Amino acid sequence: MIYCISFVCFISLTAFGEKLQEQQNLQSIWKELEKLKEIDFLKERTLALENEVKGLKLQNYNLNQKVETLERRCAVHSVEDVERTEKTGTMANTTNNHSFSFNKTFESRKRTSKLNRQRSILPRQVSIQTHIAFTAGVSVLNLHNLGINQAIIFDHVITNIGNAYHPHTGTFIVPVKGAYAITLTMTVEPNKLQWLELIVDGGSTYYISAGQADARNYASTTKQWILELHTGSEVWVRKKGAAHTDLNGFMNTIISGYLLFQT
């Protein structure tokens, strides 16, 4: 009788222990799920903050450009005002004696020489302030199994004068309106055919392709476009056509762009 009672108690304790263990496992799983939710929330918040920072940087850049433009206009107007004043003064002094006229002309020549030097400096300053140029490439050996419309990230930056190219997103954000030269070189492995397209503000597209299905060697193609782009426009590259195709990297697929002149 005692043996039976002990056996029943043992079974009951075993069942209770298993149930307790099961509850502990469920609690552990629940905690892990809560952690994953927190991680997903933090990722979304981080992405939102990054986009906000990018927008603020662009606004700040545009404001700086406007300030610099106003400063240049003020400098030019100041030069014109001085010239106008000197011209009026010279005409009024023609009735004075020869000695006074000579001294005035000498002083005017000195001022004019100074103004000419200022004019020669202003264009160089404008040119320096509007220098925009970048070159970046795909650093990994190959990009495999690219999906339809997948963005191509040129992650290794060689040159980024003006900091208008963003390597984390592969996007060139136009800082000032003007004519830009954009050059794209793509390379594919043997027996591969690949298409890419240059996107401007999600609308205008320009295509480039390289390779063929029965080629035995690597194939490469380069294209260049001269585009008039507006301030704030976004330029990037994505895959075109069927999914699950490859692209050769190792800095054999690169993009470059630079400002020719403002418009």
Image (cartoon, rainbow, N blue to C red):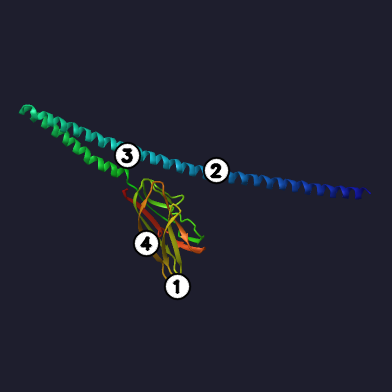
Neighbour tally class for label 1: few under 14, some 14-19, many 20 plus, Cα within 10 Å: few
Residue 108's x, y, as percent?
Answer: 14, 32
Q: Amino acid at mark 4?
A: Thr
Q: Is residue 117 above or below residue 143?
A: above
Q: Amino acid at mark 3?
A: Thr
Residue 90's x, y, as percent?
Answer: 13, 31
SS for dot 4: strand
User: Which corner quadrant of the image does residue 37 belong to?
Assistant: top right
Residue 225's x, y, as percent?
Answer: 35, 57
SS for dot 1: loop
Q: Earlier in the sequence, mark 4 or mark 3?
A: 3
Q: Amino acid at mark 2?
A: Arg
Q: Are marks 2 and 1 in contact (CB under 8 Å)?
A: no
SS for dot 3: helix
Which residue position is annotated with label 1?
214
Q: CA distance from mark 1 to mark 4?
A: 21 Å
Q: Earlier in the sequence, mark 2 or mark 1?
A: 2
**Front position in the image: 85 or 169:** 85
Q: Earlier in the sequence, mark 3 or mark 1?
A: 3
Q: Earlier in the sequence, mark 2 or mark 4?
A: 2
Which residue position is annotated with label 3?
69
**Numbered circle sitting on residue 45:** 2
Residue at image position (90%, 48%) is: 5
Which residue position is annotated with label 4?
222
Q: CA distance from mark 3 to mark 1?
A: 55 Å
**Front position in the image: 145 or 60:** 60
